[in-house]
Structure formats: C-alpha cells, structure tokens
Image (tube, rainbow, N blue to C red):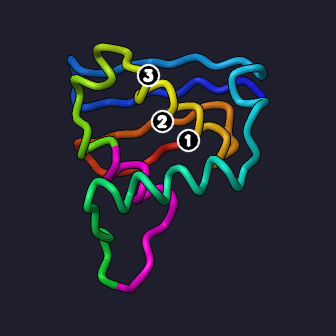
Amino acid sequence: MEHHITVSFGRDQAYLFELVDADTADMTWEQARHWIDEEYVNTGCEAARRVGTAALADKVVRIAMAYGAQAFAANTAWANKFVRCTGRAIGKIKITIDIANQVVGL
C-alpha cells in the first residue's frame, strides 16, 4: 500500500514522505507496532490522557514531538523508519500527523 505521510509542526514546518509498497513490505504490522511501542518508551513519553494506555495515534504524535522538526527536516534515517512504521501500523494511504494540535488525521 502506498502512503502519503505528512508530519506538521506548524504552517511553515510540514514534511511530506511518500512511500511505495516496497518501503513497508519487509515488515509486518506487529513489527511496526512493536517499533513504535519501543520508541514511545525510549523517549520517556507518557499518555496524553490519564486512562492508562496510550492509543497508537497518541504514541505517534508524542514520539514525533520528542524528536522534533529537525529530525524530519533533515530526512534522517530515524525519520524514514518512523514514517515507514507509522504507515504500516496505521494502514491508511493518507496520514497527517499534526503536532501543533496533537492529532493524527486520516
């Protein structure tokens, strides 16, 4: 599945990543989700809502916030892994990660 993933830190800081099938073919949904879960813990993130567990969308937003715009602007290896895992785990063609509003749009 193709993915068009935008990570937005505000009006002038939006980064578009376009993935083709081959970009996510080497990982399962479980592997992608596991990577996101590990990054969530490694960055010291906490759930936005105090109900115990964090939803996948919340984790993705919090991880992107922790790494900041510079990781996406520089198109780092980490940023590419992040968008690959996000695309695979969420499984939608168009995904917008809006850091300013702390939401994931599909």
Indicate the quadrant where residue 53 lies.
bottom left
Q: Which residue is mark 1?
A: 86
Q: Which mark is residue 82?
A: 2
2 or 3: tag closer to the N-terminus:
3
Q: CA distance from mark 3 to mark 1?
A: 14 Å
Question: Was residue 55 drawn as part of the magenta stretch in this picture?
Answer: yes
Q: Amino acid at mark 3?
A: Ala
Mark 2 and mark 1 in contact? Answer it, CB < 8 Å. Answer: yes
Disc tally is: 3
Look at the picture and state if 101 lies above or below 67. below
Question: Was residue 78 drawn as part of the magenta stretch in this picture?
Answer: no
Q: Amino acid at mark 2?
A: Phe
Q: Nearer the viewer, mark 3 or mark 1?
A: 3
3 or 1: tag closer to the N-terminus:
3
Secondary structure, mark 3, is: helix
Q: Counting other residues with Cα less than 10 Å from the Cα at mark 3, is it few (<14), some (14-19), or many (20 or more)?
A: few
Region rendered in magenta: 51-63
Q: Counting other residues with Cα less than 10 Å from the Cα at mark 1, is it few (<14), some (14-19), or many (20 or more)?
A: many
Look at the picture and state if 31 lies above or below 25. below
Q: Amino acid at mark 1?
A: Thr
Asked whether 74 or 11 is in front, the reply is 74
Residue 28: image location, x then y, percent: 76, 46
Q: Nearer the viewer, mark 2 or mark 3?
A: 3
Q: CA distance from mark 2 to mark 1?
A: 6 Å
Q: Is residue 26 left or right of residue 56?
A: right
Indicate the quadrant where residue 43 lies.
bottom left
Q: Quadrant of the C terminus?
A: top right
Look at 50% across and 52% down and name the residue there: 36
Look at the picture and state if 73 lies above or below 55. above
Q: CA distance from mark 2 to mark 3?
A: 9 Å
